[in-house]
Image: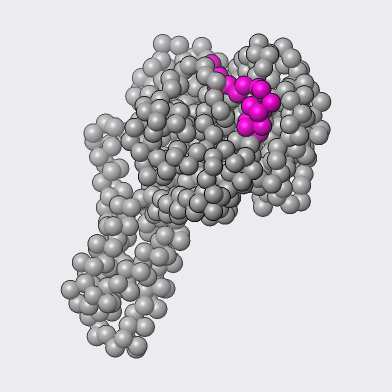
């Protein structure tokens, strides 16, 4: 097996990079390799604890965010192996990701960039793992939804190539920058990434330049990775949308594939950006419609002008707080923001609009209705899953972790999943907070499953990447699904990965 360098550019990824590095370490067994991680000016830098857990890693730091392409070029100057892997920090690689990809690229003498099958955490395919170069027509079809409406059409779905069999090896225009392999020789010939792309588009550009030199880019689906999209951009979400569409303008200005004036291309990209930004800011339209409907039902019969003001005073803060971009229904924690705003609206209505007290009362009835329907819906779904037997009865492996207890103390933290307790290979080391939820030793799993009806096993990984390992033979003859539960720093910030995709 040829030696390789694995390059990871980390930005705001300290929750996920321990699990990423743990999977990379396991996948590189028996491969002559090196791992290079650049902390790219993260607002939350990687901790000393994480660095000590992975002493084999070459750690680099930048005091500012260099962007993805420039960061990769800097890290690549420290690489010494003949093949380079560039992977995102919010990924988990399968055990065969490097070995199979290395073998494949060596068998293809004119291979440029090779990318594998990239899955979402639920196991569905990420369409970005195989793409055509962007064209005005493909952009129009994608923006207005025709690509989604006709996914098997070569004409409408040309950009993401959804008409292709996801299990078939294919030559493509471009692969995803979240995981790909390229020879060091070709990378240097191309001059690395174009640093004028700050974020997004640099992978398309690299693929385009490789094809111009006569190389072929391949989608190779015989191995998988899991990619948790958006971790690097979640603290700069609005800016990341602008970066994406600016990258498309740079790409079209640089390569000029189509005889269309650049200003027309820019107008089209600007229109697509407005549609994209709006659809991402408010993907949960139904919640917004419910809220506005409640406000107008309460205040509309009294005064339409006042109802519009009241709707704006509730809708706009909830949009800024991210409620309409989240599927969660726990709306009570928004009260501390909405209540002062509604007091201000009431005072404004009373003193400047000279509205009677009945109008003021409608403010708090509307606010109560907005919070109340969320709680009713939340508990309705919760009990429906219980009594309809749709809840997945689960047990966590890892009773010795001191951050595990919060998973037992909050309702529906993982929607549709009922966490029964935890098991451990070292139950005597269980913390006091976890001991009351401890169901037994991992060797007793069969009897515990028979007793509790457990059907899913959640292997807990804390923020430092630590997780308990156990003998897989214990799972023989047990109809258990295995998931990796990666904990985040904040409430509700976690990832759940089906481990069958990482074998």
The furthest residue to the left: 301
The residue drawn where x is 65% and y is 13% is 108
Q: Does the magenta stretch include residue 78?
A: no
Could you say which quadrant of the image residue 294 lies in? bottom left
x%, y% of residue 307? 27, 73
Judge whether 295 appears above or below 450 on screen: below
The residue drawn where x is 52% and y is 19% is 170
Residue range in magenta is 206-226
Judge whether 170 appears above or below 459 on screen: above
Quadrant location of the C terminus? Answer: top right
Which of the pair 260/165 is nearer the observer?
Answer: 260
The residue drawn where x is 45% and y is 11% is 476
Q: Is residue 281 in view from this perspective?
A: no
Q: Is residue 345 left or right of residue 219?
A: left
Quadrant location of the N terminus? Answer: top right
The furthest residue to the front: 259
């Amino acid at each position: 097996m040829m030696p390789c360098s694995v390059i990871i550019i980390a930005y705001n990824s300290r929750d996920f990079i321990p699990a990423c590095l743990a999977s990379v370490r396991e996948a590189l067994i028996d491969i002559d390799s090196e791992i290079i991680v650049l902390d790219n000016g993260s607002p939350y830098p990687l901790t000393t604890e994480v660095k000590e857990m992975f002493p084999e890693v070459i750690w680099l730091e930048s005091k500012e965010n260099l962007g993805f392409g420039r960061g990769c070029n800097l890290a690549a100057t420290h690489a010494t192996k003949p093949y380079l892997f560039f992977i995102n920090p919010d990924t988990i690689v399968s055990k065969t990701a490097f070995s199979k990809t290395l073998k494949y690229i060596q068998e293809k003498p004119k291979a440029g960039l090779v990318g594998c099958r990239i899955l979402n955490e639920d196991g569905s395919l990420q369409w970005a793992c195989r793409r055509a170069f962007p064209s005005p027509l493909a952009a129009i079809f994608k923006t207005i939804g025709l690509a989604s409406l006709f996914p098997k059409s070569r004409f409408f779905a040309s950009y993401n190539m959804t008409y292709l069999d996801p299990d078939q090896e294919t030559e493509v225009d471009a692969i995803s920058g979240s995981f790909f392999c390229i020879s060091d020789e070709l990378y240097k010939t191309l001059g690395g990434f174009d640093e004028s792309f700050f974020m997004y588009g640099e992978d398309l550009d690299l693929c385009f330049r490789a094809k111009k030199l006569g190389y072929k880019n391949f989608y190779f689906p015989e191995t998988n990775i899991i990619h948790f999209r958006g971790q690097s951009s979640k603290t700069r979400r609005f800016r990341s949308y602008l970066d994406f569409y600016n990258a498309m303008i740079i790409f079209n200005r640089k390569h000029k594939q189509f005889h269309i004036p650049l200003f027309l291309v820019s107008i089209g990209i600007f229109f697509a950006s407005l549609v994209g930004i709006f659809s991402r800011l408010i993907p949960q339209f139904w919640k917004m419609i419910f809220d506005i409907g409640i406000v107008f039902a309460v205040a509309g019969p009294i005064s339409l002008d006042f109802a519009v003001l009241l709707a704006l005073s509730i809708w706009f803060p909830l949009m800024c707080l991210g409620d309409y971009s989240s599927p969660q229904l726990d709306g009570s924690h928004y009260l501390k923001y909405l209540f002062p705003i509604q007091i201000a609206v009431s005072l404004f209505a009373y003193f400047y609009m000279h509205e009677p007290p009945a109008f003021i009362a409608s403010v708090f009835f509307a606010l109560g209705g907005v919070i109340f329907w969320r709680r009713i819906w939340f508990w309705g779904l919760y009990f429906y899953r219980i009594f309809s037997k749709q809840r997945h009865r689960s047990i966590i492996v890892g009773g010795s972790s001191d951050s595990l207890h919060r998973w037992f103390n909050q309702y529906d933290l993982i929607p549709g999943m009922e966490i029964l307790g935890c098991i451990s290979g070292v139950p005597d080391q269980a913390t006091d907070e976890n001991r009351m939820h401890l169901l037994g030793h991992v060797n007793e799993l069969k009897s515990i499953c028979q007793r509790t009806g457990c059907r899913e096993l959640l292997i807990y990984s804390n923020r430092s990447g630590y997780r308990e390992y156990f003998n897989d033979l214990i799972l023989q003859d047990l109809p258990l699904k295995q998931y990796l539960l990666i904990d985040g720093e904040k409430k509700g910030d976690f990832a759940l990965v089906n481990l069958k995709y990482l074998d």
